[in-house]
Amino acid sequence: MKRNHFLDVLKGICILLVILTHFDWTEEQTLRFLFPFWVNPAVPIFMIISGFLYTASFEIKEISNLKSAYNSRKILQKIYRFLIPFLLIYGIELLLKVFVLKEKLMVFETLFQLLLGGYGPGSYYFQYMIQSVFVFPLIYFAIKKWDIRGLLGCGLANILYEIIKSLFRMPEDVYRLIVLRYIFAIALGCFFSIGKFCIKKWIGILSSILGATFIFLYSYVAYKPLLFYWWTKTSMMAVLYVAPIAYILIKRCTWKCKILETIGQASYNIFLVQMVFFYMAKELYSGIKGEVLPMIITYISCICLGILFYKVEVPITRNVLRLNAKILK
């Protein structure tokens, strides 16, 4: 299968937007600069891309049933690719807590925070990636077998999760850690890859208008949704807005940009680095005045350190995977 270089470019753009949204913006600034329409969709687009790439991997490897999809060796390989970078970055976070923030580490808190995905903004993302390893085969075979009905079924599962969250008064800290709130976005990526049902242009336009209207009402008119009242700007309704745009970008665009491709390839590592950076931001920004300079420092630091981390981590992960393969034999 020919590599789609634009996917790396798109991932590069999205990680830049993720960093942007983690700055200390006021609500008034985010609304004035229309963040809900071009910055907040970054994570949903990441999820759509993940579904698209997972599907391509399944197709190349000709995974034809759940037994092969849940093969222990394959599952471990995928988990290691997310786990090893995270453990390395979490170790760095703990060292910074001790030697920079001068905090004492408590065993229970340290282990608990490990399960929560570490410190800093976006700590839920590692959890999502691990959960998606187990959830995606179900999405893939649902769409493979039932096509558009499988996609709609995933959308229904997304809505059902929102209903359960409301009925059982799920704590927000728990809700944010469960990948089911993005199951429709992941399924969209899968459908964009292998879906056979031809969706008319007017449906895509209607979807985008419906999602944009929901975002506008929530962000600018103080509308309070009954179901999607947490993380609303990246919820399933917001995904309806960005889905047609993501489809056009993924399926039609062929634009290449080496710098953005490199950033996109290292996007997961950059994401982990920015978590640490923003967690330490108060210490790092002490004595620096103004807004532009901290922003420049953050972007340069997160991107350069993230790419460096990627270059160092990839060989480590490969060696662990080789060792794991030998052990399993």
Image: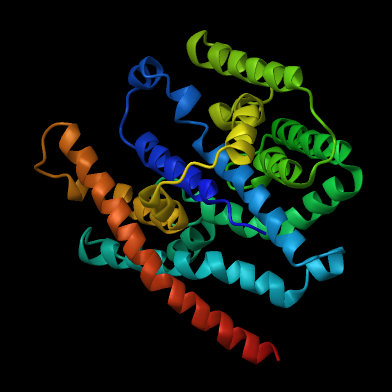
| Residue shown at the point (18%, 33%) measured from the top left | 292
Task: Report the number of numbered marks.
Answer: 0
Residue 259 coordinates in the image, percent (x, y): 36, 50
| Residue shown at the point (78%, 23%) measured from the top left | 200
Quadrant position of residue 91: bottom left
Residue 105 appearing in the image = no
Q: Is residue 291 above or below residue 60?
A: above
| Residue shown at the point (73%, 43%) measured from the top left | 187
Q: Nearer the viewer, residue 319 or 102?
A: 319
Residue 294 coordinates in the image, percent (x, y): 19, 40
**Residue lying furthest top in this view?**
221
| Residue shown at the point (40%, 55%) measured from the top left | 262
Residue 305 coordinates in the image, percent (x, y): 29, 59
Q: Nearer the viewer, residue 224 or 135?
A: 135
Left or right, 182 with reference to 68: left
Left or right, 78 with reference to 150: left
Quadrant of the frame with the N terminus: bottom right
- Report the colour scheme: rainbow
Residue 98 coordinates in the image, percent (x, y): 26, 66
Residue 261 appearing in the image = yes
